[in-house]
C-alpha cells in the first residue's frame, strides 16, 4: 500500500470520527434546542467536510480544492468560537455575524488566485486559524475562572494547544504533506475537545438543576409557611367568630327552652371546633408539641375507636416552630390514612430526641400496603414538609402486617 493511500485512509477515518461527533451534537440540539449545540454541530460538520476537501487536493492537486479547504477551515474555526461564546457568555446571534464568515472565504480566494504565493497562503491561513482557536481557548479559560471545573480546564488547555498546533501548517504540512502527523494530532485534540465539551455541558446542566432544586425547595418552604399562616387565620376566625356566634345562639335557645334546636346548634358548634382544630390546633401554639400530639391521639381514639398508643418522653428539647408543625402534620396525616385505608385495630406513635433533632415513627397493624406506596396528596405533603427541613421520610412494611412511617428531622439549621 503506497503512502498516499495510507494518508487518504487516515483522513477518511478522521472525517468519520468528526462526522460522528457532529451527529451527537445534532441530537443534543434536537433534544434541547440550545443554540450552541447547533453551532457545534455545524462546526464539526464543516470540519469533516474540510477533510474531504484536503483529500481531494491530495489526489488532484487542483487549486479549487485548496481554496475550498482553506475557506471551510476558516469558517469552521469561527463556528467553534461562536459556540464557545454562546455557551460561556450567552452570545446572541446577529445578522452581521454572518459577514464574518465571508472573511476567510474572501482571503482564501485572494491568497490562492491572486497572490499565488504558497508561503503567504500557508502563513496567513495558519495565523488566522491559530488566532481564532487561541481565542476559543481564552473563552474557556475565562469560563473556568467563573465556574471552576476539570472540563473547563481541559477545554482551555486543548484549544490553546490546538491553536499552537495550527502554526505548524506552513512548517511541517505545506500543501498537504505531513498528513499522518496532522491526522494523529488532530484526532487527539478533537477527542479531547469533544469529551471536555460534553462534560462541561453536562456539568453546567447539573448545576442549573441543583440551583432550580434549591429554588423549588425554598418555594416549597415558603408555600408551607403561607399555608400554615392561612390555616391559623381561618382557624382563629372559626373559633373566635363563628364559634362565639353559635355559642350565643345556643345560650339563647337554652334560655327559651328549645332543647332540640339547642342540640342542633351544639352539634354545629362541635363541628366548627373540630374543623378549627384540624386546621390549626391552638394547643400547638399555646402549650407546645407534646401536649398537641397527645390531644391529637386522644381525639383520634375518641372519633375512630382505634386503639392508639403514644410513646414519648416527658419533655424534649425546644424545636423551631417549622419542625413542630411538620411533626404534627405528619402524625395527623398518618392517622388520617390509618382511619381511611388500613382497617387497623391498633396504632403506635413514637417520638424520640435524636442528636439534637427528632425521630418519629407511626406503625399500624392493618392491611399490608405496597412499599413504596402509591403517591397521593397526603403522602406527598408529608414528604415535602420533612424534606424542606432537611429531614428524611421512609415507608416500610410493619412487622407481621400493616404499614410503618419513619421521619427524621435534624437539629435546627
Image: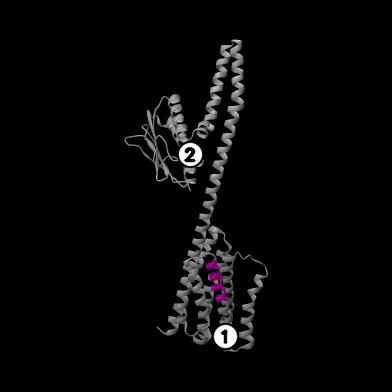
The numbered dot on residue 215 is none
Q: What stretch is highlighted in magenta?
A: 132-145
Q: Nearer the viewer, residue 103 or 292?
A: 292
Quadrant hosting residue 306:
top left
Left or right: 184 as drawn, with respect to 120 = left
User: Residue 110: image x %, image y %?
Assistant: 64, 84
Residue 20 appears in the picture as rendered: no
Residue 352 included in the magenta stretch of the image: no
Tell me the chief SS of the magenta region.
helix
Q: Is residue 166 left or right of residue 315?
A: right
Give the percent coordinates (x, y) of residue 237.
Answer: 60, 30
Residue 199 in percent (x, y) is at 48, 64
The residue carrying pointer 2 sits among few (fewer than 14), some (14 to 19) or many (20 or more) residues within 10 Å by Cα, namely some
7 up-or-down from 365: above or below: below
Q: Mark 2 points at which residue?
A: 324
Q: Which of these two is toward me, 128 or 309?
A: 309
- Secondary structure at numbered mark 2: helix
Residue under the point 63% across and 88% down: 115
Depth check, front residue: 379 or 168: 379
Q: Residue 123 carries which label?
A: 1
Q: In this view, does 21 lie above or below 314?
A: below
Amino acid at each position: 500500500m503506497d503512502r498516499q493511500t495510507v494518508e487518504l485512509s487516515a483522513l477518511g477515518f478522521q472525517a468519520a470520527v468528526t462526522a460522528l461527533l457532529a451527529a451527537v451534537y445534532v441530537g443534543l440540539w434536537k433534544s434541547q434546542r440550545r443554540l450552541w449545540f447547533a453551532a457545534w454541530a455545524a462546526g464539526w460538520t464543516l470540519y469533516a467536510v474540510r477533510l474531504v476537501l484536503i483529500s481531494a487536493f491530495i489526489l488532484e492537486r487542483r487549486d479549487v480544492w485548496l481554496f475550498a479547504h482553506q475557506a471551510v477551515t476558516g469558517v469552521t474555526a469561527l463556528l467553534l468560537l461562536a459556540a464557545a461564546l454562546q455557551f460561556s457568555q450567552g452570545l446572541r446571534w446577529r445578522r452581521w455575524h454572518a459577514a464574518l464568515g465571508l472573511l476567510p472565504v474572501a482571503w482564501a480566494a485572494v491568497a490562492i488566485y491572486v497572490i499565488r504565493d504558497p508561503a503567504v497562503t500557508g502563513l496567513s491561513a495558519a495565523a488566522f486559524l491559530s488566532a481564532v482557536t487561541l481565542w476559543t481557548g481564552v473563552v474557556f479559560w475565562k469560563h473556568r475562572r467563573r465556574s471552576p471545573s476539570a472540563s473547563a480546564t481541559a477545554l482551555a488547555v486543548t484549544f490553546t494547544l490546538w491553536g499552537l498546533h495550527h502554526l505548524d501548517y506552513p512548517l511541517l504540512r505545506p500543501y498537504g504533506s505531513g498528513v499522518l502527523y496532522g491526522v494523529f494530532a488532530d484526532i487527539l485534540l478533537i477527542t479531547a475537545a469533544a469529551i471536555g465539551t460534553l462534560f462541561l455541558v453536562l456539568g453546567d446542566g447539573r448545576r442549573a438543576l441543583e440551583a432550580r432544586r434549591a429554588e423549588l425547595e425554598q418555594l416549597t418552604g415558603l408555600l408551607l409557611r403561607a399555608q400554615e399562616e392561612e390555616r391559623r387565620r381561618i382557624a382563629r376566625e372559626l373559633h373566635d367568630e363563628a364559634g362565639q356566634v353559635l355559642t350565643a345562639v345556643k345560650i339563647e335557645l337554652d334560655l327559651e327552652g328549645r332543647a332540640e334546636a339547642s342540640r342542633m346548634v351544639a352539634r354545629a358548634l362541635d363541628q366548627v371546633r373540630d374543623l378549627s382544630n384540624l386546621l390549626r390546633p391552638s394547643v400547638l401554639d399555646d402549650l407546645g408539641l407534646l401536649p398537641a400530639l397527645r390531644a391529637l391521639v386522644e381525639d383520634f381514639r375518641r372519633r375512630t375507636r382505634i386503639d392508639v398508643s403514644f410513646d414519648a418522653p416527658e419533655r424534649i428539647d425546644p424545636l423551631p416552630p417549622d419542625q413542630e408543625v411538620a411533626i404534627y402534620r405528619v402524625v395527623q396525616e398518618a392517622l388520617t390514612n390509618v382511619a381511611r385505608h388500613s382497617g387497623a385495630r391498633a396504632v403506635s406513635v413514637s417520638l424520640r430526641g435524636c442528636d439534637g433533632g427528632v425521630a418519629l415513627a407511626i406503625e399500624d397493624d392493618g392491611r399490608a400496603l405496597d412499599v413504596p406506596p402509591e403517591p397521593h396528596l397526603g403522602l406527598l405533603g408529608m414528604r415535602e414538609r420533612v424534606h424542606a427541613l432537611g429531614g428524611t421520610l421512609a415507608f416500610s412494611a410493619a412487622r407481621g402486617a400493616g404499614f410503618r412511617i419513619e421521619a427524621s428531622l435534624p437539629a435546627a439549621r
